[in-house]
């Protein structure tokens, strides 16, 4: 909201800037005079001409007006109540509705000096809206009740970007509606359900004096914040000969969100490498780095960064490491009750080994950290060797392996055994040396947790044997093996039941017992405004296999993975396919998802 008639006297907010030491009174009066001279809003002048920090500005407003301070980027843009206020009103007065229901109306503002004027305007608009509804014969208790807004202070630059995005979205909708036929409207809705709403608009960031130039710092930061809001797990920055694209991995699926100009490729990679403390002059070799991005006063998100030289530039991939994912708790991971009991029983054994297996991105780290959090008590000495440490866990001694200086998994493990450990976690067993030391630790009174890259629980045991670990050592040290995958969860709002003949269900892996003793309802993904392609979030599918005396005997007889898998099923341990079908019968996912993540 602009106002050329800036007051000549210092307001309470301005005095706060002086009292907090940001400006002297004389300097502030000079800024005020300059803003009046060039006919610009005083706040805008501070930001544009004095490079004043938007964050500090918001903090000063919050303190001066005694209003809560919010981080706008902690809200998901697509979930905001865009219809709560007219888009033109939002743009002209630089405000944005955040929450609107029958009890609350929360509005973001960057300059609270105009709140009194805005409240009168909003009340007047509300009265006009009621009058119109009565004329139309639409009257309800809710529509007659005026909800006084609750105001929260936000950073000017973040609000400006989202207000522009809101206005652009509204304009696009209006322009399209004017020319669309009914058939085209249906096609557009289908595209939206497939994820087109993820497209990241670069226009708000472009330099008005030079439209071809993109302010890289703001653009990259916005891409990172956007990925966090959309709950992405990875970001891919990919250069090609004639194009450049940015993709997010959301719920396990890569989706294109932006297509910057090819000319921006070097600037984008340089900015990301600077943020992750890489050598920007080194473009011939892969590099690893890390970014810490503060998203709130008490919360920061880490990004693990890797650069890879490709034919047309450096591809950079960022993995989002959200500490809250390590604190989810075992109950929300998707274990069946019997699987959960097996996992907890194995964790509380005085010694032995628990192995977790699966491909990259299958949730192994979350399972490991969940187990460590369960074991993390004052009486336990826990050490981990990781490559790299993804999430910092209070009370646990975490070591970053560094092969360049000779600190590998095996070296760290040897050192752990001289540190009086109770529980040891090895990020991955990659070679016979690491495997032998881990086995020795498990046999000498320690609980060991680790991972391997295999497709199933039985294959994990044969993989250890193929590494060179004696069968007897495997059978007497390994307590439990977990293989896992992540499937997308159906949106509870729009999922739709479908009819599949029993014959087809039997061919897909269901049993006669499933069809006769249970009411099997299979759902399909549809898609709505609350989800993407009919899915929202992910849940784990697990194969949890305890090393029973029968399975231990097979291991010592050098049985292959097929024989071990057959015995495990006879003992009632579900394989990944069967666990996935259970999730389908529970209405949590679809057959397509189970087929995608299992090889059966």
Image (cartoon, rainbow, N blue to C red):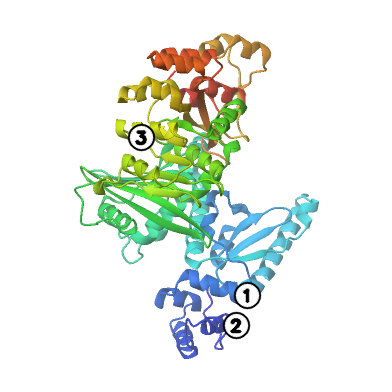
x 42%, y 49%: residue: 398
Q: Which residue is mark 3?
A: 437
Mark 3: secondary structure: helix
Lower position in the chain sequence, tag 2 or tag 1: 2
Q: Position of residue 115 (x, y in %)?
A: 64, 72
**On residue 65, which mark appears?**
1
Q: Nearer the viewer, residue 7 or 379?
A: 379
In contact (CB < 8 Å): disc 1 and disc 3: no
Q: Is residue 11 left or right of residue 416?
A: right
- Residue 599 figure quarter: top left
Name the secondary structure under disc 1. helix
Depicted 43 relative to depicted 68: above or below: below
Which one is earlier in the sequence, the residue at label 1 or at label 3? 1
Q: CA distance from mark 3 to mark 2?
A: 67 Å
Residue at image location 54% in from the left, 84% down from the top: 19
Q: Is residue 494 left or right of residue 591?
A: right
- Secondary element under disc 2, as helix, strand or loop, is helix
Is residue 33 or residue 546 the one in the foreground? 546
Q: What residue does disc 2 label?
A: 12
Task: Using the numbered discs, state the Cα–Cα distance from disc 2 to disc 1 in whole angstroms.
Answer: 8 Å
Confirm whether residue 588 shows in the render. Answer: no
Q: Are marks 2 and 1 in contact (CB under 8 Å)?
A: yes
């Amino acid at each position: 909201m602009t106002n050329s008639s800036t007051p000549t006297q210092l307001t309470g907010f301005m005095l706060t800037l002086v009292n907090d030491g940001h400006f002297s009174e004389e300097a502030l009066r000079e800024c005020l005079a300059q803003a009046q001279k060039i006919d610009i809003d005083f706040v805008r002048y501070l930001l544009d001409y004095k490079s004043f920090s938007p964050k500090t500005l918001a903090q000063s407003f919050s303190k001066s007006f005694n209003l809560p301070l919010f981080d706008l980027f902690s809200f998901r843009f697509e979930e905001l109540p865009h219809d709560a206020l007219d888009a033109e009103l939002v743009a002209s007065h630089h405000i944005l509705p955040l929450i609107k229901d029958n009890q609350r109306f929360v509005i973001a503002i960057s300059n609270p000096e105009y709140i009194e004027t805005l409240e009168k305007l909003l009340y007047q608009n509300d009265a006009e809206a009621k009058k119109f509804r009565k004329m139309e014969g639409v009257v309800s208790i809710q529509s007659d009740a005026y909800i006084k807004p609750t105001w929260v202070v936000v950073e000017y630059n973040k609000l400006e970007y989202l207000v522009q995005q809101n206005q652009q979205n509204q304009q696009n909708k209006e322009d399209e509606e004017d020319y669309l036929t009914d058939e085209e409207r249906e096609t557009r809705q289908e595209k939206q359900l497939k994820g087109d709403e993820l497209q990241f608009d670069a226009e708000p960031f472009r330099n008005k004096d030079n439209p071809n130039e993109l302010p890289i710092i703001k653009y990259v930061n916005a891409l990172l914040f956007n990925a966090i809001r959309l709950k992405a797990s990875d970001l891919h920055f990919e250069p090609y000969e004639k194009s450049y694209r940015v993709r997010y991995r959301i719920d396990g699926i890569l989706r294109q969100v932006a297509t910057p100009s090819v000319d921006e490729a070097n600037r984008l990679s340089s900015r990301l490498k600077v943020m992750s403390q890489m050598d920007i002059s080194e473009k011939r070799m892969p590099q690893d780095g890390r970014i810490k991005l503060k998203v709130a006063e008490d919360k920061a998100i880490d990004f693990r960064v890797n650069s890879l030289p490709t034919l047309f530039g450096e591809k950079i991939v960022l993995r989002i490491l959200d500490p809250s994912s390590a604190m989810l708790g075992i109950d929300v991971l998707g274990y069946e009750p019997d699987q959960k009991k097996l996992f907890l029983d194995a964790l509380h054994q005085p010694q032995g080994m628990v192995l977790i297996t699966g491909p990259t991105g299958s949730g192994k780290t979350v399972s490991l950290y969940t187990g460590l959090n369960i074991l993390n008590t004052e009486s336990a000495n826990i050490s981990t060797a990781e490559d790299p440490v993804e999430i910092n866990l209070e009370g646990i001694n975490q070591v970053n392996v560094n092969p360049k200086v000779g600190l590998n998994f095996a070296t760290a493990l040897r050192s752990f055994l001289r540190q009086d450990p109770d529980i040891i976690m090895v990020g991955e067993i990659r070679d016979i040396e690491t495997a032998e030391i881990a086995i020795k630790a498990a046999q000498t009174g320690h609980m060991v947790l680790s991972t391997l890259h295999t497709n199933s629980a039985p294959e994990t045991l044969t993989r250890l044997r193929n590494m060179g670990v004696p069968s007897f050592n495997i059978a007497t040290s390994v307590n439990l093996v977990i293989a896992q995958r992540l499937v997308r969860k159906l949106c509870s709002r729009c999922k739709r039941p479908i009819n599949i003949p029993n014959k087809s269900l039997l061919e897909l892996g269901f049993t006669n017992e499933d069809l006769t003793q249970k009411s099997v309802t299979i759902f399909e993904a549809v898609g709505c405004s609350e989800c993407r392609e009919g899915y929202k979030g992910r849940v784990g599918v697990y194969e949890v296999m305890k090393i029973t005396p029968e399975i231990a005997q097979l291991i010592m007889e050098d049985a292959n993975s097929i024989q071990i898998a057959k015995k495990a099923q006879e003992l009632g341990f579900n394989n990944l396919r069967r666990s996935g079908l259970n999730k389908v019968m529970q209405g949590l996912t679809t057959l397509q998802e189970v087929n995608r993540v299992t090889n059966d």
